[in-house]
Amino acid sequence: MRGCFYILSILFITLSCNQKEKDKQTQLVPLLKQMSDLATVEYVITKIIKASDDKTWYKVGNRKILMSCKASMIAGIDLSKINEENITISGKEITMVLPKANLLSINIKPEDIKTEYEDVSLFRTAFTNAERDALSAQGELQIKNSADSLGILQAAEVNATLVLSNFLRKLGYETINIRYVGDKNNGLQ
Amino acid sequence: MTRTIKKYLVIVAVLLVIIFLFQKLNWLPSFGNFFKSKPITIDNTPILIKEINNLAQLITITSFDEVVMDSSKKSKRLPGTFFPPPDAKIVLIARGKVMAGVDLKNLKDQDISIDKDSITIKLPPAQVLNTILNPSDFETFSESGNWNTEEVTQIKIRMREKVIQRANAQNLLPKAAERCKMIMENFLRNLDFKKVEIIFKDQSP
């Protein structure tokens, strides 16, 4: 009886472990998310990332690094926010109210980040990969925060108007009015 | 004599209590922070626009994935040393995303045919539009020895290929095409088309 109990216990523990392993495997599968974004503009930009590591008082000597990076910023509109209420059709005339453009992605390819200059004094160690990545990540954040000042969102809206107008013209509409949520003017085409 | 020592001990004890209380109230800088390395911050440099490209890409699906890759290399022996140094090793973790959809720029006039309230559109095949592995998406789990930018870049490129490969293994493109078909159908039905047919040129969803 006791032997039977031990065997059952071992079997239970083994099965539990197998289940955990299965759970682990399912977590490793890429997650797919459905989108409805219309990307209408891409800005290719460049930026210099420069830093000097001389702020810690007890570290003797300085470390300087200068990196250059190229990034691609893509902006557009979310088509899932358009519904029947945003579209008015009257014969060959159509009026659409589109959602405001937003930044869809920033892409800095690893090969587009280059270390142009590195100066490490005698008593200091060279920049590690983790440190270089942390500096590049700061550059990425600065690029992300600059989206508004670069005017990419306005350009995305202008291009979205153009893309949709061309498409609607192909569908046979002659008068196309496209405006954006919150716009005061009618944005007539 | 004993009285003086006692007096000094009381003063020291009172000072220690005051320091303890001040530390608890955060009125004194902590010793930990005093010996902590200051973070390295980058300067605020201008951003230059090199190109502006007009796009018409319908992004319908994004795959989010996490991959791990390690690499090792022989370290160079320093002059005058007998034993070779240990191998340089690096382990990176990357969280990447692959965006797939249809490039509507390739849509021609002849790809659209309308007959009263029926419409047929021949769309270009779904494709991977963008693969993103930004610097903030990487984590260096372990690093020993010297690794220069070029060597690490090669590892990161291999990680990007792995992210794309794993996304494709999940049928990313057929799913992107299926989703694109649904979005276009909904959009065209909102435009009062009763019968909508979406066909993909080279690949059916």
Image (cartoon, grey):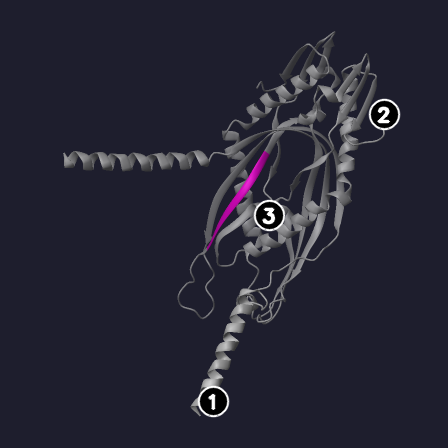
Where disc 1 sits, the SS reads helix
Q: From the viewer's side, name the closer residue of B148 and B194.
A: B194
Q: Is residue A103 above or below residue A138?
A: above
Query: Which secondary structure class fits the magenta region best?
Result: strand
Mark pair 2, 1: CA separation: 93 Å
Question: Which residue position is annotated with label 3?
Answer: B135
Disc marking residue A188: 2
Task: Name the amino acid, label 2.
Answer: Leu
Q: Marks 2 and 1: same chain?
A: no
Q: Is residue B6 above or below residue B186?
A: below
Q: Position of residue B167 (x, y in %)?
A: 53, 32
**Residue at screen point 85% across, 25% down:** A188
Question: Which residue position is annotated with label 1?
Answer: B4
Q: Chain of mark 2?
A: A
First reached walking from the N terminus: tag 1 or tag 3 = 1
Magenta-drawn segment: B89-98
Mark pair 3, 2: CA separation: 42 Å
Where disc 3 sits, the SS reads helix
State which quadrant residue A101 falls in: top right
Q: Quadrant of the C terminus of chain B?
A: top right
Mark pair 1, 3: CA separation: 64 Å
Q: Chain of mark 1?
A: B
Q: Callout 2: few (<14), some (14-19), or many (20+) C-alpha neighbours within 10 Å?
A: few
